Amino acid sequence: MGASFFRARGEFDRAPCVVDNALARHQPFPRPVVCDIFHIVEGRVIPRVPPGLSDAFTALYVEASYDLTAEEFVPFRPFLGQDSQRHIWAQRTTERDGHQFSLAAVVGIHDYGADLEFQQAKAADAALTGFDLHYGFRLRRGTGRADKTDAGWDEVIAAVRRMHGTHSVDVVLYQRHETSTVVPAVALPIAVKETDVPGFSEIRGVRLVKAAPEAGTEELYSVTIDRAGDQYHARIATSIELPLDEEMLVAAHERARSIADLAFHKVSG
């Protein structure tokens, strides 16, 4: 695969775009509407909601992006029509273990060939192809918008699945813990002296990181803890190798939850 202009300019790190039929417009990610159970039916992939989600669970994001060669981009070209980019959505709500969850799934297809910014970047890096693909699943507690599936969803997610076997995905898990139920690895808040940190009296948040051995600034995973009133708000981030199948969210949640367990210890009794 060629170098990724999509990843290079950080577009995947921002919220994906909302799609209005076939027209993609840059707007914030909508309130999700979640898929009940992801299964495979005639090539479609719908990951199932992980069982036994704790009361601390708030949201789970699983996302991946790719730079494609011209040959790899061929199966995705028909989805664009006359446009240079498109986002195709599937949204569902479901009940699991007595709780409501919403799931938003998106596949984004981009051809930056005519983009002036891309042309300038390619002049400096000939390896850039301008053909980019990304997908993501966002599972959240609570209900979302009405169920919706854009035209072409079944075909595009099947095309993504055929192209990629096990691959690297970015996983982010959000949790909220009552301060009476857990003890964080770093006690918060941390008092600071006015003479040491002028204008501030406490540190109420920390970011714990597991660095990759001999890999410079690369991180294997991280946990951000923020104390807000009587709660700890946590963000757990990592990257793991997974196939795009019905067990994707289950495996992603299990890995992220195991990392969270390193940062929070349950209060016994």
Image (tube, grey):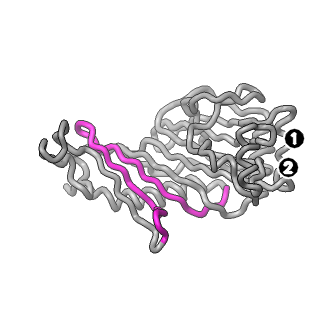
| Identity, as a three-letter code, of the amino acid under mark 2 | Pro
* Residue 204 at x, y percent in the picture: 24, 44
Q: Residue 233 lies in what quarter of the image?
A: top left
Direction bottom: furthest residue: 214
Say whether residue 259 is left or right of residue 64.
Answer: left
In the image, 79 versus 129, the foreground residue is 129
- Name the image quarter holding the N terminus: bottom right
Point out the stretch of residues depicted in magenta.
Answer: 215-244
Q: Using a 10 Å C-alpha cutoff, classify the residue at mark 2 as few (fewer than 14 neighbours), some (14 to 19) or many (20 or more).
A: few
Q: Residue at x 66, y 60 (%)?
A: 243
Residue 236 is a magenta residue: yes
Please give the residue where the numbered disc 2 appears in the rendered image.
75
Above or below, 98 against 183 in this view is above
Amino acid tagged 1: Pro
Residue corresponding to mark 1: 78
Q: Per the image, is 74 magenta?
A: no
Q: Give the spatial CA distance, label 2 vs label 1.
A: 7 Å
- Quadrant containing the C terminus is bottom left
